[in-house]
């Protein structure tokens, strides 16, 4: 085994809550390494809705998922966190000295005094369409997420799904794509009511086609996807031409190896003590969508609150003999130095 990286803290997950955990730990002089199974920092914000507006971040009236992640990365720069991407934590074992040995799928190893699980819904994977021959077109003409919207300009697009992601992209691409067709298995949608209303208005205006049914087969020519067959509840079928097929069937949350770490698990989520967001194992904390407790709300701002309390709890865990003082970034010279700022003085 390669020599492990020794650190005060390992954060599993680089979504907004994981990034803010870096900040809160940094203010308390706790250095962190961040591990994520995705190839890019940002978690679901980047993978699923990088260009979707977010309206409920305090003091930021609106920002996209990408802008939120970029701002968080700027905010944590002073603390020089090291990121280890495109790898999953495959095992976690408590050592005789109280530290935790973590190993990853890329054969990296860490000896951490504390661990913060900020893994969202776990090692999430998009729910896929089980159809013969579809794998040949994935990431070429069949997509489970949109990373580059410009590549679909002027194309005949078919979008499948009935939730927010599907309707958000429908509304985005109408007027940009050559044609947009929405397919859903029933004429009921789980998306925001205003999105459903806009979608139906576009259908009434003839700018969008809505098909109630399911894709039953693919049509191809010379190795390219050229069309699909859609069947409705009565067994009637229709063929649709397609240049790009976008599938938004939601996520399949999987705790993966986390489920084997001996933590208290409740409905695929990690139970925590809300005084400190510690799990059933001292020294291991869970913040964000991965945790569960009475009254839990899966909001980014809730995760930020959890990260702050978890950081203070970890500081006390790491140095039980030391009194941890609450300092304010507005007035503390120590925090100003840590952040590399020199605010003006007010007499």
Image (spheres, rainbow, N blue to C red):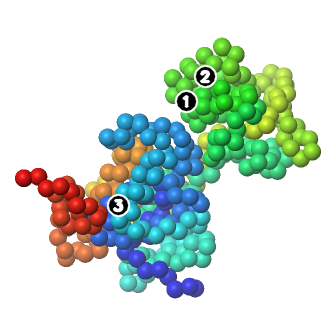
Dots 2, 1 in contact, CB < 8 A: yes
**Is residue 83 visible in this depiction of the protein?**
yes
Disc number lying in front (2 or 1): 2
The residue where tag 3 is placed is: 23
Name the residue rendered at 26%, 61% in the picture: 341
Instruction: Tell me whether the residue at label 3 lies in contact with that at label 2, contact meaning CB atoms closer than 8 angstroms.
Output: no
- Residue 164 position, x and y percent, is 56, 34
Question: Which image quarter: residue 19?
Answer: bottom left
Determine crowd level at label 2: few under 14, some 14-19, many 20+ residues with C-alpha closer than 10 A.
many
Give me the residue at 36% from left, 45% from top. Answer: 301
343 lies left or right of 115: left
Q: CA distance from mark 3 to mark 2?
A: 40 Å
Mark 1: give few (<14), some (14-19) or many (20+) Cα within 10 Å. Answer: some
Q: Is residue 313 visible?
A: no
**For residue 302, above or below residue 174:** below
Residue behind mark 1: 191
CA–CA distance in space, label 2 to label 1: 10 Å
Mark 2 — residue? 199
Label 2 element class: helix
């Amino acid at each position: 085994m390669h020599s492990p990286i020794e650190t005060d803290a390992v954060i599993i997950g680089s979504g907004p809550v994981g990034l803010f955990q870096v900040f809160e730990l940094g203010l308390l002089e706790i250095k962190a390494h961040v591990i994520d199974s995705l190839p890019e920092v940002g978690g679901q914000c980047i993978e699923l809705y990088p260009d979707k507006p977010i309206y409920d971040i305090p003091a930021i009236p609106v920002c996209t998922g990408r802008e939120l992640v970029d701002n968080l990365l700027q905010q944590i720069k002073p603390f020089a966190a090291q990121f280890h991407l495109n790898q999953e934590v495959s095992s976690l074992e408590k050592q005789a000295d109280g530290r935790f040995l973590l190993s990853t799928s890329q054969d990296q190893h860490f000896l951490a005094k504390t661990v913060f699980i900020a893994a969202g819904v776990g090692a999430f994977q998009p729910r896929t369409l089980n159809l013969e021959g579809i794998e040949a077109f994935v990431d070429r003409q069949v997509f489970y997420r949109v990373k580059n919207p410009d590549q679909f300009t002027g194309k005949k697009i078919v979008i499948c799904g009935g939730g927010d992601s599907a309707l958000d992209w429908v509304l985005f691409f109408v007027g940009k794509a050559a044609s947009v067709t929405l397919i859903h298995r029933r004429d009921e949608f789980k998306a925001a009511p205003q999105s459903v209303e806009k979608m139906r208005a576009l259908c009434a205006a003839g700018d969008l086609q809505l098909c109630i049914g399911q894709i039953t087969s693919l049509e191809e020519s010379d190795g390219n996807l050229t069309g699909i067959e859609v069947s409705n509840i009565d067994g009637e079928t229709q063929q649709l031409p397609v240049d790009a097929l976008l599938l938004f069937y939601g996520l399949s949350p999987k705790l993966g190896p986390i489920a084997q770490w001996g933590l208290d698990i409740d409905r695929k989520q990690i139970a925590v003590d809300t005084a400190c967001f510690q799990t059933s194992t001292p020294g291991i904390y869970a913040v964000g969508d991965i945790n569960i407790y009475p009254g839990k709300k899966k909001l980014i701002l809730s995760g930020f609150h959890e990260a702050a309390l978890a950081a203070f709890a970890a500081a006390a865990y790491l140095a039980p003999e030391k009194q941890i003082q609450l300092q304010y970034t507005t007035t503390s010279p120590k925090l100003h130095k840590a952040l590399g700022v020199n605010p003006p003085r007010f007499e």
